[in-house]
Amino acid sequence: MADINARKRGKKWEYYFEIAKMDGKRKRISKGGFNTKAEAVSEGVKAMHEYQTAGTVNTPSELSMHDYLNYWIEMYCIPNLKPTTVANYKKYISLHISPKIGKYRLASITAEQLQKLINDMVANGYSKNTVIGIKGVLSNSLNYAVQPLHYLKTSPMAYVKIPKGSRTNYRSSQYKREVIEKDIIDEIFKRFPKGSSTYLPLMFAYHCGMRLGEAFAITWDNVNF
């Protein structure tokens, strides 16, 4: 390991240290302008760490699961996925994953913790789509920690499963169909009047029996006057 050296240049101090040779010639990194030798050495330590880690901002052994997931969102998801997908991932992380395991170190997360998180969500009646979505976020993010980041040797999600025979526990199966009375509909349209972004989808849903997801997806080429 190269030593960090400091020398006085005029009235200021400068740090410097040797780095890898380029074209067979010795190279060094240096920076001056510090008021004291101690200040120069302190900044030199930071500069050497950045050089030795190739500019990597994270130390895997100290990285929390919460911070890692945010890093994964910024480094991989935003450049590669649709904004709606990224938004859903952020929602799963902030509402369901970070509150449960975000405080733990990435390197210490176990399959047992992750399986318990999934089991608890099913037992508490979360919808099938939500459980599948959260499992997907955990699997994809931890696979990325293995490759290409090499933060982990293997993914603790590799053998985590959604419990079989638990369909009756999902919240979606507990919903009962209810008729929305006209006075309630009138209150809804007062809250979302004509001209608001949700007015037309709500009208489609109310008058045509569409699900809201279908109503919001309608485009002009779907309309037959």
Image (cartoon, rainbow, N blue to C red):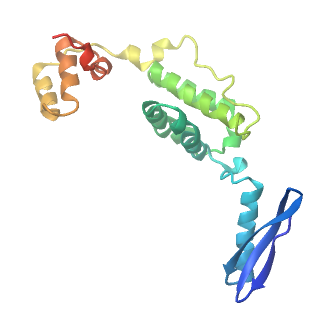
The residue that appears at 72% across and 72% down in the rendered structure is 42
The residue that appears at 18% across and 34% down in the rendered structure is 196
Q: Quadrant of residue 52?
A: bottom right
In the image, residue 4 sits, relative to residue 185, either above or below, namely below
Residue extending farthest to the bottom is: 11
Q: Quadrant of residue 2?
A: bottom right
The residue that appears at 58% across and 44% down in the rendered structure is 71
Q: Quadrant of residue 198?
A: top left
The spot of residue 110 in percent (x, y) is: 69, 34
171 on left or right of 185: right
Residue closest to the eye, 174 or 103: 103
Disc tally is 0
In the image, residue 112 sits, relative to residue 5, either above or below, namely above
Would residue 1 be seen by someone viewing this image from the given angle?
no
The spot of residue 174 in percent (x, y) is: 37, 16
Would residue 146 be seen by someone viewing this image from the given angle?
yes
The spot of residue 33 in percent (x, y) is: 67, 80
Q: Quadrant of the N terminus?
A: bottom right
Residue extending farthest to the front is: 23
Residue closest to the eye, 154 or 71: 71
Residue closest to the eye, 111 or 87: 87
Q: Quadrant of the C terminus?
A: top left
The spot of residue 119 in percent (x, y) is: 56, 24
In the image, residue 30 sits, relative to residue 65, either above or below, namely below
130 on left or right of 143: left
The residue that appears at 81% across and 68% down in the rendered structure is 17
